Image (cartoon, rainbow, N blue to C red):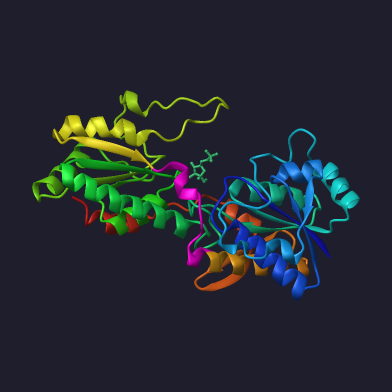
Amino acid sequence: MRIGILTSGGDCPGLNAVIRGAVLKGTEINGQEFVGFRDGWRGVVAGDIIDLPRLAVRGIAKEGGTIIGTSRTNPFEGEGGPERIQATLDRLGIDAVIAIGGEGTLAAAKRLTDAGLKIVGVPKTIDNDLNGTDYTFGFDTAIEIATEAMDRLRTTGDSHSRCMVAEVMGRHVGWIALHSGMAAGAHAILIPEQKTSLEQIGAWVRSAADRGRAPLVVVAEGWVPNHADDAHSERGLDAFGRPRLGGIGERLAPMIEELTGIETRATTLGHIQRGGVPTAYDRVLATRLGMASSDLAQDEAWGNMVSLRGTEIERVGFEEALTALKTVPQHRYDEAAMLFG
Ligand code: F6P
């Protein structure tokens, strides 16, 4: 069986480990052959491929990014669509596709599979907001990077008696904010799932300052202040017509300063959370998922993706990942909030 692999959507530490796991298991055990589509679905639509022999994946588990490139191309737009893609796969002699991606990628993969294409999936996002799997690779690396940055913000905050605001990724959910904030001992964590008033934030910040601590406030990029007439929550659209992300930390800092009288600085961690080497945990998880994706294709389990359940790798239908985003449950936020202030 000749398999094409693609990585799609935002990059994520561990993508290369997935590719390596699939190619090693596939070539050594399952008798498969691999190519990579360049830049996600763009490469599928354009038939733009590179060979992925065993040698091409040597030593890449520790590399950040993706050796085959990624993009946010939608396979149903432009020259795409199931018939044309199937014709391209036939022309290239590709029997099946392993799609590594997040919600958008898996939704597209499901539509294509429903139309008869042979696709299996590997769930991917640093945000950890996909259902159908307990954790996604890349999340552990993101929280490690964010926690380390917060540890650094705390020492400079302490030296100047300032409140430090750290903005982390998470446009719809607060998993990165919750885990990195808990690890760093944040005095407040603000996530999209929770409505939190400025007064409450001010109270937490003052209480930490009263105990002689430099307050650390962690905010997810998708958090919106909880007061109706707040001009700061008006983010507008970006050049592509998408809701503008990021910048909430910069807007929140002056509000905290005004409310508490405590000098406040903001830092946006941004794409640093997605770059660089994956943690050992993510390398292992991604390698296991990659190996299992080769088995899925071998079993012709089209329309399924690999998934982590507890400590085991299992297989579930694409639809399990597409029902709804996996948000932070109330009890997990309440547990963290017991330590705020
Ligand atoms: O979904 C992963 C993610 O990293 C989000 O946390 C973030 O909002 C978004 O991607 C950023 O996307 P881009 O790299 O396209 O700016």
| Residue at x-position 49% and y-position 31% | 243
- Left or right: 190 with respect to 113? left
- Residue 284 or 312: which is nearer the viewer? 284
- The magenta-colored residue range is 269-282
- Left or right: 335 with respect to 202? right
Q: Quadrant of residue 247?
A: top left
- Is residue 170 shown in magenta? no
Q: Is residue 299 visible?
A: no
In this rendering, is residue 144 above or below 168?
A: below
- Residue 163 or 298: which is nearer the viewer? 163
Farthest-out residue, bottom: 29
- The x, y position of residue 261, in whole percent, is 13, 33
| Residue at x-position 51% and y-position 59% | 278
- Left or right: 187 with respect to 319? left
Q: Quadrant of residue 286?
A: bottom right
- The x, y position of residue 92, in whole percent, is 87, 51
